[in-house]
Image (cartoon, grey):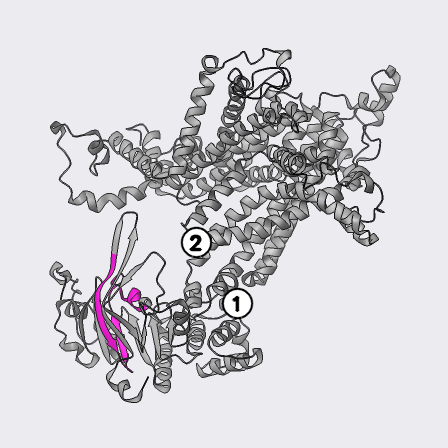
C-alpha cells in the first residue's frame, strides 16, 4: 500500500461478480454480474429480500456456504485477490481488515460465551495480547460503543442483554482489530425503532472517527440515503442503478423510482400506496 | 361433513402436508409445461400422475404417492434396504420350495460340517442343514415382529390420541403410565415379563409388546396435540361429531405417516430384542430354528466351528440393517420434520 | 423467572416418587402373575401342607392384594428386597456385590463411546455429504443393526482365539483370582489401591473386549446425535460471526459450535449410559462378567423371582436417577437456564 496509489485505487474493487447455489432442483443464480468499487466512503446497498445484497457482502469475505460457486473478473480488497487468497490470508482479512455486523444479536452472538469473551477472542485472533490486556481492551471497546456499565456487560451472556445492547457488543467486537472496512448487513432491522437511530449514529461515528469504509446493506431506501455517500440499488442479483445518495430523488431507473413511489409519506396525503410493477426487461443480461 | 366419507379426505390431507415438498419444487417447471392433457388425449401414466391439475381426488392422492416414491428412489441406501426386505420376504414365503433339507432332519454322522455343495451353509450340532433352518427361522422372527407391531401400534396410537385429545387428568394419567414403562430398559423389562410367564414365542411377543408401546403413545400424543388445534377439527366438533368419532376418524389418520416411519425404524430393535431373548433361552425354545436360539446352541462351538453361530448372526444383522436403511429413507420422505 | 424455574424443578422432583411407585407396581404385578408359587419356592416342593399354610401366612399371601402391595412397598422402602433362593443371600447383598463389576464395565464403555462418538459425529458434520460423512452414517446404522451377542462372539473368536491379543471371558486371569483385596469392588481401582500393577494390567486387559463391545452400540447413537446437533449449530448465525472474526476452523468448530451442542449432548450421553445396562445383560452373559446383568439372567433361568424383580427394580431406579441427573446437569450447564 504505497501513498500515491491510495487515492486512485479503491479499497474494494468488484467487477462482474457471479454467485450460484447449486441444489437438487437446479441452480439458483443469486448474484449475476455485479460491479462496484468502494473507497474510503460509505456505500449503501439497497434491495428487497432475495436481491443478492447480503450474498454480495459475504462474497467479499468469502463467507458463503461450501456449496456456493463464485466467479468474478475482479474481486479485490486492497491488494489481496479474494478469489485467489489462501485460507490463512482470508482469515487475516476477515475480522482483521473487514468487519461484519449481522442483523440480529439474538442469533449472531454465541449464546454460551460472555460478551467480553467474544470481544477478547476477536482481539486475540489478530493481535498478540495477553489475557489481562485483552480484557482491558474489551472493556475500553465496550465503553467506546457507549455502554454505560461496561463491567456488567462484559460478564453478561447474550440472553441477558437487550437487542440494542447486543448490537453494540457486536459492533465493539467487529471494531476490535481496527478493520478498514465495516460491512453492516441490516444492522438495525431486528431492533426496536427507538434504538435503530442510536445504533446507526454509533456506526456512523465510529466509521468517521476511525476513517473506515462502510458498506451498509439494507432494504430501507431512505435510511441508506441518509447515512451513505453513494447508493447502489440491487434487484434480482444485479445492480440496477448506482448514484450519489444526494441525487436519489433524481433516480432514473424504473425500479428505484418504483421503490421511492411505494413509500408512505407524512407530508403528502395518499389514498393508496402504489404497488411495484416489475419489468422482465430489467433482468436482461447487460454488458 | 356428512356428505362424503369423512375419513379419507383427512387422511389425504395428512399425506399431502407430509409430502408437499417435492410437489411445490416441481411447480414452476410444470407451469411452463404444456397444459394438462385432455381426458381423450390418452396421456402417459407418468403424466397422469405428475399433473398439477388432478381431475379427481384419487388422482391427486396417487400423484402424491408417486412423488414420494420418486423422492424415495433417489436414496440408494433406502432402496438397498427395501430390496433386501423384499428378497427376504420372498425367501421366507417360499421356504418350503427353496430349502434344500427338512429343517428338523438330523444327520448325526455329519455334525458341524463346513459349508459345502450339499449343505450350503454347513450343518449344526445335530447335523441339521443351517441354510434350511435359517429360512424357516426367518418365518419365526418375522412372524414375531409382525405380531408385536400389530399389538403395539394400535395400542400406542389409541393411548396417545386419547391422552392428547382428552387432555387434563386423562393425559396426565396415561402419560405417567407411559413414563413408568419408559423408566425400565426395554430388554430388562421384557426379561422380567418373560420370567413371569413361560419362556416361548408367545410370551416373548407379549413381553416385547408390553415394553414397546410407550414410544408410540408419546409420538401419537405429540401429533394429536398439534392436530387438535387445527380448524378442521374445530369444524368437525361444531358439526356435533362425538369425541370418539373425531379421534378415530380425524386425529388418528393424521398420526399415521410418522407412525409408519417409527414402526419401520423400530422393526430392527424388535428383531434384536426377539433374538436377544432367544439367545438367553427365554424366547423361542430349542427345536425351533429361531435365529437367536440357533446362535445360543451353536455358541459352544464358536472357537472351532464358528460358521455355525455366525450364519444366523448374519441373517439377524441383514434383516435389522435392511429395516434401518428403509426406515431412514422413509423418514426423509414422509416425515421431514423429524431429524 | 426464578420462581418459574424453581417450580419446574419441583415438578421434576415430585415426579420421581410417583415414577418409583409405578416401578414398584409393575414389579409387584409381575411377581403376582408368575406361575411359580412363591410359597413352594421358599419351603420346597415336598413340604407338608401345614408348613405350606404357615409359610403362606408368613409371606402375607392370605391378605387381600392391596395389603400385599402395601407390605411389598414398605419392604422395598426399608431396603428389603427379599432373599434369593439361588444364593440364599438377601437380594440386596447380591446386588451390592455384583453391581460394581457392571458399573466398572459400563463406565469405561461410556467413556470410550463418548470420546469416539463425539469425534466421529463432529467429523461427519464438518464434512457433510463427503465420503467420510457417508461412512459414519453407514457405521451408525450398522451399530443399530448388529446384535450385541453376535459381535461379542465374533470378537472373542478373532481377538482371543485367532489372534490371541486379548484374554478370554472372565474378569481376571486365574493367577490373579481373589488376590486383590476388594475395597470398592471395582477391580481396576482396587488393584491400583493395592499397588498391584500386574493385577491392574490383567484387569484392564479383561475389560477391553466387553467394554469395547458395549461401547460400540452407544457410540453409534452418540455419533448420530452429535452429527445432527452439530449440523444445526454450524448453520447458525453466530458461526458466521465467528468466521467473520477470522477465527481458525478448529476454534469455530470446537469453541463455538461444539460448546453449544455440549448441553443437549450431556443428556444424550446420560441416557445412553442408562441404556448400557441393557446391553450389559447380553455382554456379561457372553464374557462371563460377574455383574448385575449376569446375575439377572442366571436368576431368570433359575426362576429366582425375588432376585429378578429386585434387580429389575434397582435397574429401573438407576435409570430414573440418571435421567434426573441429566436434567439437573442440563440446567447447570446452559447459561440460559441458570
Q: Residue sitting at 63 percent across and 53 percent down?
A: C10
Return the chain for callout 2: C
Along the line of sight, the residue nearer the viewer: A188 or B228:
A188
- Report crowding for label 1: few under 14, some 14 to 19, many 20 or more residues within 10 A (C-alpha): some
Check disc 1 and report the residue beneath it. A113
Along the line of sight, the residue nearer the viewer: A133 or C4:
A133
Check disc 2 and report the residue beneath it. C127
**Residue C267 shows in the view:** no
Query: Image quadrant for the C terminus of chain C?
Result: bottom right
Q: Residue sitting at 13 percent across and 39 percent down?
A: B35
- Marks 1 and 2 sit apart, C-alpha to C-alpha, by 25 Å
Magenta region includes residue B128: no
The x and y percentages for residue C18 are 66, 42
Query: Which residues lie in the magenta part?
Result: A29-57
The x and y percentages for residue B297 are 65, 23
SS class, disc 1: loop
The x and y percentages for residue B125 are 64, 18
Is A90 left or right of C63, judged from the image as shown? left
Is the residue B215 above or below the residue A250 in the image? above
Return the chain for callout 1: A
Is C57 left or right of C210, judged from the image as shown? right
The x and y percentages for residue C6 are 61, 58
Amino acid at each position: 500500500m504505497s501513498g500515491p496509489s491510495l487515492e486512485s485505487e479503491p479499497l474494494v474493487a468488484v467487477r462482474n461478480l457471479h454467485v450460484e447455489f447449486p441444489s437438487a432442483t437446479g441452480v439458483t443464480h443469486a448474484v449475476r454480474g455485479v460491479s462496484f468499487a468502494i473507497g474510503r466512503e460509505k456505500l449503501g446497498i439497497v434491495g428487497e429480500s432475495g436481491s443478492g445484497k447480503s450474498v454480495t457482502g459475504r462474497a467479499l469475505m468469502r463467507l458463503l456456504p461450501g456449496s456456493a460457486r463464485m466467479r468474478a473478473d475482479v474481486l479485490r480488497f486492497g491488494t489481496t485477490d479474494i478469489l485467489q487468497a489462501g485460507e490463512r490470508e482470508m482469515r487475516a482479512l476477515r475480522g482483521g481488515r473487514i468487519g461484519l455486523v449481522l442483523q440480529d444479536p439474538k442469533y449472531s452472538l454465541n449464546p454460551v460465551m460472555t460478551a467480553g469473551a467474544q470481544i477478547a477472542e476477536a482481539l486475540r485472533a489478530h493481535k498478540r495480547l495477553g489475557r489481562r490486556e485483552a480484557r482491558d481492551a474489551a472493556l475500553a471497546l465496550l465503553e467506546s460503543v457507549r455502554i454505560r456499565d461496561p463491567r456488567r456487560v462484559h460478564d453478561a451472556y447474550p440472553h441477558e442483554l437487550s437487542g440494542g445492547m447486543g448490537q453494540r457488543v457486536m459492533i465493539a467486537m467487529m471494531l476490535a482489530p481496527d478493520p478498514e472496512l465495516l460491512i453492516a448487513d441490516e444492522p438495525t432491522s431486528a431492533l426496536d425503532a427507538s434504538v435503530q437511530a442510536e445504533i446507526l449514529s454509533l456506526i456512523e461515528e465510529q466509521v468517521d472517527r476511525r476513517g473506515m469504509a462502510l458498506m451498509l446493506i439494507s432494504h430501507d431506501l431512505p435510511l441508506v440515503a441518509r447515512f451513505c455517500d453513494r447508493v447502489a440499488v440491487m434487484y434480482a442479483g444485479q445492480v440496477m442503478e448506482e448514484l450519489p445518495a444526494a441525487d436519489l430523488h433524481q433516480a432514473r431507473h424504473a425500479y428505484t423510482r418504483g421503490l421511492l413511489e411505494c413509500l408512505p409519506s407524512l407530508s403528502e396525503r395518499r389514498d393508496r400506496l402504489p404497488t411495484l410493477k416489475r419489468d422482465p426487461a430489467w433482468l436482461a443480461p447487460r454488458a | 361433513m356428512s356428505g362424503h366419507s369423512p375419513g379419507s379426505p383427512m387422511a389425504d390431507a395428512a399425506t399431502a402436508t407430509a409430502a408437499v415438498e417435492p410437489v411445490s419444487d416441481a411447480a414452476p417447471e410444470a407451469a411452463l409445461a404444456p397444459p394438462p392433457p385432455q381426458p381423450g388425449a390418452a396421456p402417459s401414466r407418468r403424466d397422469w400422475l405428475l399433473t398439477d391439475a388432478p381431475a379427481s381426488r384419487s388422482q391427486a392422492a396417487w400423484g402424491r404417492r408417486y412423488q414420494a416414491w420418486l423422492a424415495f428412489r433417489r436414496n440408494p441406501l433406502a432402496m438397498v434396504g427395501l430390496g433386501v426386505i423384499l428378497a427376504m420376504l420372498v425367501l421366507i414365503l417360499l421356504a418350503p420350495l427353496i430349502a434344500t433339507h427338512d429343517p428338523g432332519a438330523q444327520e448325526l454322522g455329519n455334525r458341524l460340517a463346513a459349508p459345502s455343495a450339499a449343505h450350503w451353509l454347513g450343518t449344526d450340532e445335530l447335523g441339521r442343514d443351517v441354510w434350511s433352518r435359517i429360512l424357516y427361522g426367518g418365518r419365526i422372527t418375522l412372524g414375531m415382529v409382525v405380531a408385536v407391531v400389530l399389538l403395539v401400534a394400535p395400542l400406542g396410537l389409541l393411548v396417545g390420541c386419547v391422552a392428547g385429545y382428552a387432555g387434563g387428568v386423562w393425559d396426565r394419567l396415561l402419560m405417567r403410565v407411559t413414563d413408568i414403562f419408559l423408566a425400565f430398559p426395554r430388554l430388562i423389562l421384557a426379561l422380567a415379563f418373560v420370567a413371569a410367564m413361560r419362556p416361548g414365542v408367545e410370551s416373548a411377543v407379549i413381553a416385547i409388546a408390553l415394553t414397546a408401546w410407550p414410544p408410540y403413545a408419546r409420538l401419537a400424543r405429540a401429533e394429536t396435540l398439534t392436530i387438535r388445534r387445527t380448524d378442521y377439527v374445530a369444524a368437525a366438533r361444531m358439526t356435533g361429531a362425538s369425541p370418539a368419532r373425531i379421534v378415530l376418524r380425524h386425529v388418528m389418520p393424521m398420526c399415521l405417516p410418522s407412525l409408519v416411519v417409527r414402526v419401520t425404524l423400530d422393526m430392527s430393535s424388535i428383531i434384536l430384542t426377539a433374538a436377544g431373548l432367544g439367545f438367553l433361552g427365554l424366547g423361542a425354545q430349542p427345536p425351533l430354528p429361531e435365529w437367536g436360539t440357533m446362535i445360543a446352541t451353536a455358541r459352544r462351538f464358536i472357537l472351532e466351528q464358528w460358521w455355525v453361530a455366525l450364519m444366523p448372526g448374519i441373517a439377524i444383522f441383514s434383516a435389522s440393517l435392511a429395516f434401518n436403511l428403509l426406515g431412514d429413507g422413509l423418514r426423509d420422505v414422509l416425515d421431514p420434520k423429524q431429524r | 423467572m426464578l420462581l418459574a424455574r424453581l417450580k419446574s424443578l419441583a415438578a421434576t422432583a415430585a415426579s420421581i416418587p410417583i415414577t418409583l411407585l409405578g416401578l414398584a407396581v409393575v414389579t409387584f404385578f409381575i411377581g403376582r402373575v408368575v406361575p411359580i408359587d412363591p410359597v413352594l419356592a421358599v419351603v420346597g416342593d415336598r413340604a407338608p401342607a401345614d408348613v405350606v399354610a404357615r409359610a403362606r401366612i408368613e409371606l402375607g399371601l392370605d391378605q387381600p392384594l392391596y395389603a400385599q402391595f402395601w407390605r411389598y412397598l414398605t419392604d422395598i422402602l426399608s431396603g428389603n428386597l427379599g432373599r434369593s433362593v439361588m444364593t440364599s443371600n438377601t437380594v440386596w447383598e447380591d446386588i451390592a456385590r455384583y453391581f460394581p463389576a457392571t458399573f466398572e464395565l459400563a463406565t469405561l464403555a461410556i467413556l470410550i463411546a463418548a470420546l469416539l462418538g463425539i469425534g466421529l459425529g463432529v467429523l461427519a458434520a464438518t464434512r457433510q455429504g463427503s465420503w467420510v460423512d457417508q461412512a459414519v452414517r453407514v457405521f451408525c446404522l450398522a451399530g443399530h443393526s448388529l446384535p450385541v451377542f453376535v459381535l461379542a462372539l465374533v470378537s472373542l473368536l478373532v481377538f482371543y482365539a485367532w489372534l490371541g491379543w486379548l484374554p478370554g471371558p472372565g474378569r481376571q486371569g486365574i493367577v490373579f483370582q481373589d488376590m486383590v483385596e476388594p475395597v470398592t469392588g471395582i477391580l481396576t481401582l482396587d488393584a491400583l489401591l493395592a499397588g498391584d500393577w500386574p493385577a491392574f494390567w490383567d484387569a484392564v486387559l479383561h475389560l477391553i473386549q466387553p467394554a469395547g463391545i458395549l461401547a460400540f452400540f452407544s457410540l453409534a447413537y452418540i455419533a448420530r446425535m452429535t452429527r445432527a446437533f452439530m449440523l444445526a449449530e454450524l448453520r447458525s448465525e453466530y458461526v458466521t460471526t465467528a468466521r467473520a472474526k477470522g477465527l481458525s476452523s478448529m476454534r469455530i468448530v470446537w469453541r463455538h459450535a461444539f460448546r453449544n451442542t455440549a448441553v443437549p449432548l450431556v443428556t444424550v450421553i446420560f441416557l445412553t449410559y442408562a441404556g448400557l445396562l441393557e446391553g450389559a445383560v447380553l455382554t456379561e452373559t457372553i464374557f462371563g462378567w460377574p455383574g448385575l446383568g449376569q446375575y439377572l439372567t442366571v436368576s431368570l433361568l433359575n426362576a429366582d423371582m425375588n432376585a429378578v424383580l429386585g434387580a429389575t427394580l434397582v435397574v429401573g431406579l438407576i435409570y430414573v436417577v440418571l435421567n434426573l441427573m441429566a436434567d439437573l446437569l442440563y440446567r447447570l450447564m446452559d447459561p440460559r437456564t441458570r
